[in-house]
């Protein structure tokens, strides 16, 4: 149909356009001469249409490859549609009914041999998991999410099972599911830690493959380090330097995509789990590396500042843990040289922690107003101010501590950061108590009193520490 | 690297222009083979525009060759001139298209990264960069810098060749673990399905309350959205509803978490008060 139209158009155009003797001469010698007055061997319109057709095919293929599309069989699709409707408010959020449909759909998909790695198959599994969550069946939900990410892990660690172009996308999905598992599995943080670590190693290896420079950066990582030593804080200074002048850095965002955000979320969660299992040393190592990696991966200023804040807090916690070790060691008559080493480490940790917060505050001052207005930025600055106040309080510098904590309270109020307001109130109360204790006559506290307050603080055992895991609104 | 300035290019009369209109110094976007387009070369991260322009350029080149062929027997003076000009022009244009395509096919392109970064930072600062050109005030790196970065990248890749060829190999236990979990889940699902079908299903109580309170995370508040225009289940488009409520997007949202540590100094008042974690 199209062809005949083309022919007709050509017939109309050609004689008029090429009514000239030279062209006639060419045509008469061509093998189409038998057709009479038309056509030339390749008409312009035909070339054009072929080209457009070719582009159309290329476009179609690209669309097919990159546009998200689903290829459920029609019978599975029918059941899933019923499930979606049951789940929606049109049918009164009937999660039980929806769960029934989704399980049926999965069983049907299994009998049709749908690939368990496909987005369709895992999509149904996710739906079942979400229904379990809605019905508060958390152990079942955890089990189905674990199934999904175990399968990804098997595929990713079997040579040749997944094509190289697909790997990054599978890793991205795998990390999302692992984060979900860690959120659900609150009864066994050790298990979570192990699981996160395994999946993180796969993801990090993928990043390392893309660039030798990044590979070197990653190989300094902490996740598998066995040797314990107290000098973990050496990196904190380089971080501070790099925050000052980001143009000097070697950046390599491409190596971290597309799962950059998922990877760093998982690492932050890993740090939180390390803290909750008392493995502060690993937490500090991991947090230190994470900040450096985030800079390399060109994360946003808010993300880096948040991570730097966390690093400061982990280092502070490390200093306290070492402090406890020292007081225990003193009691049990530990070797003096060992004690000195611990003291050195404690001092270093505390100093680095202070530096972390200070560099956040300095860095944030230099940011353009547009970036300062980014969501979460004010909260992060408030948190850094507060944390610095806590460190000062720990050091016995009561007056600077009071000023910082008051500023933090003000900032937290402005940002609507309720949790921090409460914490700042508590800390201010402690400052007030300490001021009264050390200096009833309301004069400025002497050095001797400060040291006394510090020593007193040390004997009180492990400190409070809040791990705040929230859904990011960004 | 050409400098294109839409307004007069003196620095002295800054601020004297129309109020509210900022003067923008526009740098021509870099390319290998699209130079004939002058200032209209698109941003290096706009692959759609780059490919389209290259395709257009190729079509122009082919047209020029076609003109030569059509006039092959024209031996008049102007005929020869036209043929010669079209042949030279056509080869130049096609050669350039080839150059540009080979650049676009490179696995790493510093200009692409740079343009993408500039576009993103403009968006982060609340500006709206031009779709075709990216942020107008961006100055692309010179070809020398481009070369330098490329050299670094090639060395970097060479150094990493060993790593690229090795694959992480998991232990058979992982596979066994997966099979075990799958089996267990399949059994439990059949069990639940049976209960649901016979109305004997009892909603389980959560077995344990967590120490780390993740209430909000535990109770995801995502609702399935069904477009208004659908009145009944039978007449609705499944793929539209599925894509609108893509479970992978829901999960991406759930996995987008924010971890913050709030340190506290030693509590002087009480030792037994342990602060629990909360969500904000």
Image: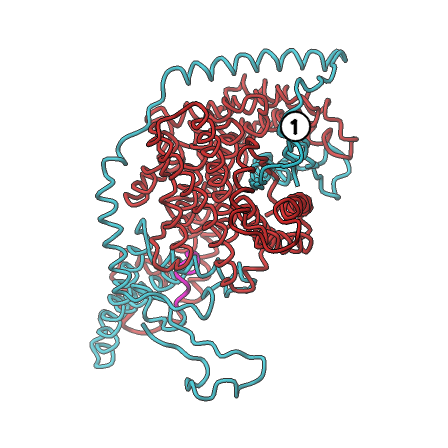
Query: Residue A210, image x and y in percent?
Result: 32, 42
In magenta segment, residue A437: no
**Which quadrant of the view contains residue B223?**
top right
Q: Is residue B66 above or below residue A171?
A: below
Label 1 secondary element:
loop
Q: Magenta stretch? A: B41-49
Corner quadrant of residue A462: top right
Provide the letter of the chain coloured cyan.
Answer: B
- Viewer-closest of A289 and B77: A289
User: What shade does chain A have?
Assistant: red
Q: Nearer the viewer, residue A350 or A29?
A: A350
Does residue B36 appear to the left or right of A67 in the view shown? left
Looking at this view, is B109 or A315 the one in front? A315
For residue A286, above or below residue A240: above
Measuring 22% from the left and 42% from the top, which residue is drawn there?
B159
Q: Position of residue A75 (x, y in %)?
A: 61, 24
In the rendered image, which residue does mark 1 sit on? B272
Q: Position of residue A60 (x, y in %)?
A: 46, 46
Q: Is residue B42 magenta?
A: yes
Left/right of residue B100 with respect to residue B80 in the rendered view: right
């Amino acid at each position: 149909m199209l062809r005949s139209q083309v022919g007709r158009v050509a017939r109309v155009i050609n004689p008029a356009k090429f009514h000239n003797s030279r062209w006639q001469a060419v045509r008469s010698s061509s093998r189409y001469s038998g057709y009479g007055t038309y056509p030339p061997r390749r008409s312009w319109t035909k070339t054009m249409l072929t080209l457009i057709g070719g582009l159309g095919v290329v476009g179609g293929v690209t669309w097919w490859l990159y546009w998200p599309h689903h290829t459920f069989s029609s019978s599975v699709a029918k059941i899933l549609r019923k499930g979606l409707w049951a789940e929606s408010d049109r049918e009164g959020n009937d999660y039980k009914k929806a769960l029934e449909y989704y399980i049926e759909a999965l069983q049907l998909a299994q009998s049709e041999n749908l690939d368990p790695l496909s987005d369709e198959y895992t999509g149904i599994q996710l739906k079942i998991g979400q229904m379990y969550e809605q019905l508060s069946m958390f152990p079942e939900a955890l089990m189905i999410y674990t199934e999904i990410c175990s399968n990804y892990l098997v595929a990713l660690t079997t040579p040749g099972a997944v094509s190289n172009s697909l790997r990054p996308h599978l890793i991205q999905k795998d990390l999302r599911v692992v984060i979900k598992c860690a959120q659900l599995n609150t009864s066994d943080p050790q298990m979570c830690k192990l699981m996160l670590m395994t999946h993180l190693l796969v993801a990090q290896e993928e990043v390392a493959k893309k660039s030798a420079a990044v590979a070197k950066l990653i190989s300094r990582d902490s996740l598998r380090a066995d040797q314990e030593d107290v000098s973990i804080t050496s990196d904190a200074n380089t971080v501070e330097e790099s925050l000052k002048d980001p143009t000097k850095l070697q950046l390599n965002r491409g190596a971290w995509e597309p799962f950059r955000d998922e990877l760093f979320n998982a690492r932050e969660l890993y740090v939180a789990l390390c803290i909750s299992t008392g493995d502060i040393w690993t937490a500090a190592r991991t947090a230190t590396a994470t900040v450096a990696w985030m800079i390399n991966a060109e994360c946003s200023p808010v993300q880096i500042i948040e991570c730097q804040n966390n690093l400061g807090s982990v280092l502070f916690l490390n200093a306290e843990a070492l402090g406890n070790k020292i007081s225990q060691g003193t009691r049990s008559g530990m070797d003096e040289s060992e004690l000195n080493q611990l003291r050195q480490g404690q001092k270093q940790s505390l100093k680095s922690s202070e530096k972390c917060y200070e560099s956040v505050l300095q860095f944030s001052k230099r940011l353009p107003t547009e970036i300062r207005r980014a969501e979460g930025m004010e909260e992060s600055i408030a948190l850094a101010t507060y944390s610095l106040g806590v460190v000062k309080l720990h050091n016995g510098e009561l007056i600077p501590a009071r000023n910082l904590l008051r500023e933090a309270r003000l900032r937290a109020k402005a940002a609507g950061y309720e949790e921090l307001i409460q914490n700042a109130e508590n800390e201010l109360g402690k400052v007030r108590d300490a001021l009264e204790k050390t200096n009833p006559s309301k004069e400025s506290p002497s050095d001797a009193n400060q040291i006394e307050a510090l020593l007193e603080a040390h004997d009180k055992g492990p400190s409070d520490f809040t791990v705040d895991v929230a859904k990011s609104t960004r | 690297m050409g400098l294109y300035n839409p307004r007069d290019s003196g620095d002295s009369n800054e601020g004297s222009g129309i109020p509210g209109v900022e003067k923008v110094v526009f740098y021509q976007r870099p390319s290998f083979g699209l130079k004939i387009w002058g200032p209209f070369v698109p941003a290096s991260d706009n692959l759609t525009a780059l490919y389209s322009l290259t395709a257009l350029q190729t079509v122009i080149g082919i047209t020029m060759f076609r003109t030569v062929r059509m006039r092959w027997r024209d031996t008049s003076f102007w005929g020869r001139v036209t043929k010669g000009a079209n042949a030279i022009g056509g080869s130049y244009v096609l050669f350039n298209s080839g150059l540009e395509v080979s650049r676009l096919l490179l696995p790493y392109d510093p200009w692409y990264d740079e343009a993408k970064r500039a576009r993103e930072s403009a968006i982060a600062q609340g500006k709206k960069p031009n779709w075709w050109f990216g942020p107008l005030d961006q100055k692309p790196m010179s070809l020398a810098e481009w070369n330098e970065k490329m050299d670094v990248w090639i060395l970097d890749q060479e150094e990493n060749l060993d790593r690229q060829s090795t694959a992480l190999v998991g232990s058979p236990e992982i596979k066994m673990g997966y099979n075990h979990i799958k089996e267990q889940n399949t059994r439990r699902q059949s069990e639940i399905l049976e209960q649901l079908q016979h109305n004997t299903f009892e909603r389980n109580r959560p077995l344990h309350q967590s120490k780390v309170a993740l209430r909000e995370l535990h109770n995801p508040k995502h609702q399935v959205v069904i477009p208004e225009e659908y009145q009944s289940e039978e007449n609705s488009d499944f793929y539209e509803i599925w894509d609108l409520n893509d479970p992978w997007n829901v999960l991406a949202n759930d996995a987008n978490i924010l971890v913050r540590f709030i340190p506290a100094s030693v509590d002087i008042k009480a030792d037994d008060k342990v602060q629990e974690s909360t969500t904000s």
